[in-house]
Image: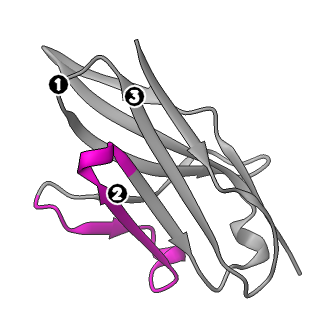
Amino acid sequence: QVQVVESGGGLVQAGGSLRLSCAASGRFSSIKAMEWYRQAPGKQRELVANFNSGGKPNYADSVKGRFTISRDNAKNTVYLQMNSLKPEDTAVYYCRAIITQIVDYRYWGQGTQVTVSS
């Protein structure tokens, strides 16, 4: 059983900052990847940030220069520092963990709401 739990969402004014955390726990030997997605009302879920195969961070164009993804491998945790938030960043933010257990399995968290007021 693998659990993925996000935290850190909330209500913030435009221009403000939030830091999201995502921790994976359960029985597994290693995590292949942990990624951040978001889904705004009426829109498809989109990738916000992850690490590419070379370990470099990768960002959606809409958040480049404002968001920073980081990770603590020892804690199986990934973070998303969000600065200069805009109302269009309002969405439910989801974390996805890809864990190799013979084959790759994808586990989603329950999501955390981020609301940016203008």
Magenta span includes 21: no
Comes first in the chain, label 2 or label 3 = 3
- Residue holding disc 3: 25
Residue 50 horizontal/vertical position (percent) = 34, 57
Task: Report crowding for label 3: few under 14, some 14 to 19, many 20 or more residues within 10 A (C-alpha).
Answer: few
Mark 1 to mark 2 CA distance (whole Å): 20 Å
Horizontal side of residue 80 vs 99, given as left or right: right
Mark 3 to mark 1 CA distance (whole Å): 11 Å
Residue 52 horizontal/vertical position (percent) = 21, 58
Task: Report crowding for label 1: few under 14, some 14 to 19, many 20 or more residues within 10 A (C-alpha).
Answer: few
- Residue holding disc 1: 29
Magenta span includes 75: yes
Q: Secondary structure at mark 3?
A: strand
Q: Which residues are magenta?
A: 54-77
Q: Quadrant of the C terminus?
A: bottom right
Comes first in the chain, label 1 or label 2 = 1
User: CB under 8 Å between callouts 3 and 1?
Assistant: no
User: Relative to 56, is 65 above or below?
Assistant: below
- Residue holding disc 2: 50
- Identified by mark 3, the residue type is Ser
User: CB under 8 Å between callouts 1 and 2?
Assistant: no
Front: mark 1 or 2: 1
Residue located farthest toward the right when viewing the structure as drawn: 118
User: Relative to 86, is 109 above or below?
Assistant: above
The quarter holding residue 28 reads top left
User: Relative to 31, is 19 above or below?
Assistant: below
Horizontal side of residue 85 vs 25, given as left or right: right
**Which residue occupies the foreground of this view, 24 or 38?**
24
- Give the residue displayed 17% in from the left and 25% down from the top: 29
